[in-house]
């Protein structure tokens, strides 16, 4: 099983920080360069009453009634489901998880739990059973408090009104903070939440015994405050190389005036930021696709610092998603299979009941009837001659991105006049057509690249024109 830890990058955008008033939560799922994903839509009532984790053996009795929800599970359930992200029928979105690390002092007082609730199971046992983002935070927090967890993680929640970021900091203790409407946050494999206001239930939730736990075990290095990151997290050289630069580049993209003094290895980067301008879903996509373009740290350049820092978009990305809620039209589960920088975010409207067949396929070895492998096929062909082929990929991406925006405007207008089965069928058709058209575009790109590659063989000879 690929190790899920040390992976992923996340973004959360409040509704007054976005250009269209929507809320966005998104994340890259990074584990292994060839580890297929597929997409599913579970119908209402599909989740069994009893859940047994294949990874940790945790057994849970689940509520009777489960909501319809989308998800992106692994190609095999041998090691667990890892459903990762989705939106349910109540327009609650969840993405799990952003892997992080706790310090030894904290883990000595509350060790991680071998048979607890881990990333593998979180979406499956939480998302189908909540009707608001707050309910999602509380359900996950109560489960971790009761059963423990074997990992340090961040989890993203949103509904049509607000977004929340949840962090577990030890075996049982957790906090969550509401993202202010006019702010965004970018997170990269570190505990990110800072000051906790225990007297502000509108914006903070937490394990009810966390203050007592910290005081009893002498864990707070600055007792006049309660900075969750400093109490529970880490701040070492690996953070400076691996995590902090990805937060830095997000601040440079969206808040350059405020973040001008920041450096890639700054250790005090703020969790919450106000953008210098309103952010669109394309901005969120660009962040999750970023590899330090325009800087000396871009791994696609010959700069001596090209591989100094871990980029956001990299070969190990299995899928990238943005869950867009609070829209004037149907909420959207955006999904880019494979490497975000070399893929396309496809919009799947919340309310659909079926998916294109190619999105339900994907296993090892590779098979080109799978959406995951269709995108990966074009991606690895582009990588083989990046200078020549990247412009061709960018042309396809630009066309598909523009087509997606056109599709959404059309769908929002027509969907407003529909309801019931007519609405469901229309959303199914719209999502299906765009997804299949995008797969066709990538198949065609792959064939074009193969055609161009036929003359790149080293077994070549330039014949004298006089012969």
Image (cartoon, helix red, strand yellow):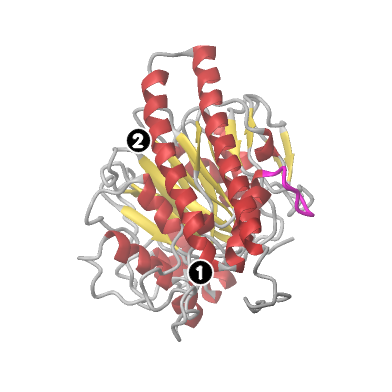
Q: Quadrant of residue 113?
A: bottom right
User: In the image, 221: left or right of 445?
Assistant: left
Quarter of the figure that contains the C terminus: bottom right
Quarter of the figure that contains the N terminus: bottom right
Q: Nearer the viewer, mark 2 or mark 1?
A: 1
On the question of residue 374 being in view, the answer is yes
**Lower position in the chain sequence, tag 2 or tag 1:** 2
Q: Is residue 263 above or below residue 86?
A: below
Rendered image: mark on residue 363: none
Task: Please identify the dominant SS of the magenta region.
Answer: loop
Magenta-tinted stretch = 362-370
Expressed as whole percent of the image width and height from the top left, the position of residue 295 reads: 37, 74
**Residue highlighted by disc 2:** 161
Q: Secondary structure at mark 1?
A: helix
Q: Is residue 429 above or below residue 331?
A: above
Rendered image: mark on residue 387: 1
């Amino acid at each position: 099983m690929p190790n899920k830890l040390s992976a992923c990058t996340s973004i959360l955008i409040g509704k007054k920080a976005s250009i269209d008033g929507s809320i966005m939560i998104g994340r890259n799922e990074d584990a292994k360069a060839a580890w297929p994903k597929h997409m599913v839509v579970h119908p209402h009532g599909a989740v069994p009453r009893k859940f047994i984790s294949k990874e940790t053996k945790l057994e849970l009795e689940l509520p009777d009634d489960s909501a319809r929800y989308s998800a992106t599970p692994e190609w095999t359930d041998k090691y667990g489901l890892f459903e990762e992200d989705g939106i349910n029928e109540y327009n609650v979105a969840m993405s799990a998880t952003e892997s992080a690390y706790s310090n030894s002092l904290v883990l000595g007082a509350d060790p991680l739990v071998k048979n607890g609730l881990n990333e593998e199971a979180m979406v499956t046992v939480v998302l189908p059973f909540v009707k608001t983002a707050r309910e999602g935070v509380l359900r996950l927090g109560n489960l971790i408090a009761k059963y423990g967890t074997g990992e340090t993680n961040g989890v993203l929640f949103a509904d049509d009104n607000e977004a929340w970021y949840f962090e577990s900091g030890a075996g049982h203790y957790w906090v969550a903070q509401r993202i202010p409407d006019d702010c965004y946050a970018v997170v990269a494999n570190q505990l990110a939440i800072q000051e906790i206001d225990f007297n502000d239930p509108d914006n903070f939730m937490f394990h009810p015994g966390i203050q007592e736990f910290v005081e009893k075990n002498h864990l707070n290095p600055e007792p006049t405050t309660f900075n969750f990151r400093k109490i529970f997290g880490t701040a070492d050289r690996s953070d400076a190389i691996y995590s902090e630069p990805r937060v830095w580049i997000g601040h440079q993209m969206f808040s350059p005036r405020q973040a001008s003094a920041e450096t890639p290895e700054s250790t005090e980067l703020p969790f919450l930021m106000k953008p210098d301008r309103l952010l669109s879903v394309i901005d969120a996509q660009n962040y999750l696709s970023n590899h330090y373009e325009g800087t000396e740290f871009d791994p696609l350049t010959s700069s001596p610092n090209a591989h100094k820092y871990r980029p956001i978009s990299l070969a190990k990305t299995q899928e990238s998603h943005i869950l867009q809620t609070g829209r004037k039209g149907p909420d959207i589960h955006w999904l880019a299979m494979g490497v975000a920088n070399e893929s396309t975010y496809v919009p799947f409207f919340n309310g659909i009941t079926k998916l294109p067949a190619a999105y339900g396929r994907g296993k090892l070895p590779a098979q080109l009837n799978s959406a995951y492998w269709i995108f990966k096929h074009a991606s690895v062909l582009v990588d083989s001659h990046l200078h020549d082929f990247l412009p061709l990929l960018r042309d396809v991406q630009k066309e598909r991105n523009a087509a997606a925006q056109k599709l959404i405007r059309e769908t929002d207008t027509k969907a407003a006049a529909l309801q019931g089965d007519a609405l469901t069928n229309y959303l199914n058709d719209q999502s299906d057509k765009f997804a299949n058209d995008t797969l066709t575009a990538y198949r065609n790109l792959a064939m074009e690249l193969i055609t161009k590659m036929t003359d790149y063989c080293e077994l070549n000879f330039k014949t004298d024109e006089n012969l």
